[in-house]
Amino acid sequence: MNNQTSGDSALQIMRTVPSLTIVVPCYNEAEVFIYCVDALNKIVTDLVLRKKIEKNSRILFVDDGSKDNTWLQITEAAKKLDYVQGLKLSRNRGHQTALIAGLSVVDTDVCISIDADLQDDIKCIEQMIDKYMLGNDIVYGVRNDRSKDSFFKRNTANIFYGSMSAMGVNQIENHADYRLLSKRALAALLEFKEQNLYIRGLIPLLGFNSDKVFYTREERVAGESKYPLKKMLGLAIEGVTSLTVTPLRLICALGFLTCFFSFLAIIYILVAKFTGQVIEGWTSVIISIFFLSGVQLLSLGVIGEYVGKIYLETKQRPKFFIDEQTTD
């Protein structure tokens, strides 16, 4: 999706070399951190030397309450490397909250979010900067090849994106949280105050000029994935319930269908009774009870998910607390 307009040429003329913050959420990334900080530091150093970004650019690692020595490694790197800074949350709050915590302290012209596992192609950072200079406030990193994924993961991802689209959720297919945001796009994103965050679904709602860069995702350099099946399902449910009320409407439609078929069944039973064709037995009754009970429990579960979100939103609790922060 490219929303560039005729005004982009003017933006391109007005834009100067930007300062950049790369925001990297980390949770128990001790095994991969040394590779991540080295790779990102080289990228930033190179871009500064070639005057693609300003010297006051930085790499901000956000420790999401890690239980290993990730924070220790971040503080050591911050002492040795000019571009590295660290932010430590008081406890584990989840990837999306850690990301928004890092974004909330960014004060540079642009920011790029990327995971610490180095699966996203860091060479795209320069391409994102180039597209920003062309007048784009948002640049999405999009996977163009899922051949390395398992059959299950590839097909469930396709089902998820298809389902979200069918429910009216506008999100970029095969895009996770690898993206560039300009200062005004970031300011707009931070205007969203909800507790239940699904950032990749909120970004398209901003409406600013956008473009994409395409890449192939690699295997983790080290460590284990922090997104097993359970967390992926949780993120999918978060996305659906945070951005659309379609499931509630489906429940309503299901209720109408159930009532309609029940009405037909009542007519059939009455006709059978008055014509003397009643067949005694309990099978149909038991099936009906189990079916309707299942529908009711499923409906209550979906409604409960939405009610739970309303409960959390009305409390307006802080999303996170910052425990420590490295100094410049």
Image (tube, rainbow, N blue to C red):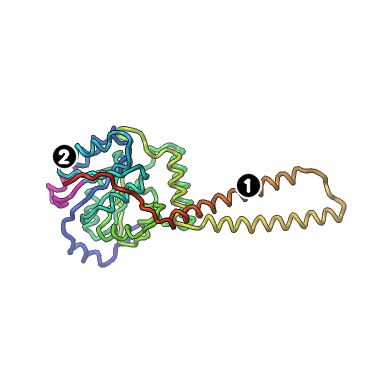
Residue 17 drawn above or below residue 327: below
Decide if residue 274 is on the left or right side of residue 172. Answer: right
The magenta stretch spans which residues? 42-58
The image shows residue 302 at horizontal and vertical percentages of 54, 51
The kind of residue tagged 2 is: Lys
Q: Quadrant of residue 206?
A: bottom left
Decide if residue 200 is on the left or right side of residue 106. Answer: right
What mark, if any, has residue 79 been given in the picture?
2
**Residue at the extreme right of the image, as rendered:** 276
Tell me the crowding category of disc 1: few under 14, some 14 to 19, or many 20 or more residues within 10 angstroms, Cα based: few
Residue 231 drawn above or below residue 128: above
160 in magenta: no
If you read the primary sequence from the N terminus, does the residue marked by circle 2 or circle 1 appear first?
Answer: 2
Tell me the crowding category of disc 2: few under 14, some 14 to 19, or many 20 or more residues within 10 angstroms, Cα based: some
The kind of residue tagged 1 is: Gly
Residue at (53%, 52%) from the top-left corner? Answer: 304
The image shows residue 88 at horizontal and vertical percentages of 28, 43
Residue annotated with mark 1: 294
The front one of 176 and 92 is 92
44 in magenta: yes
The front one of 89 and 249 is 89
Q: In terms of secondary structure, where does tag 1 sit?
A: helix
Residue at (67%, 45%) from the top-left corner? Answer: 290
Where's the N terminus, which quadrant? bottom left
Residue 314 drawn above or below residue 86: below
Q: In terms of secondary structure, where does tag 2 sit?
A: helix
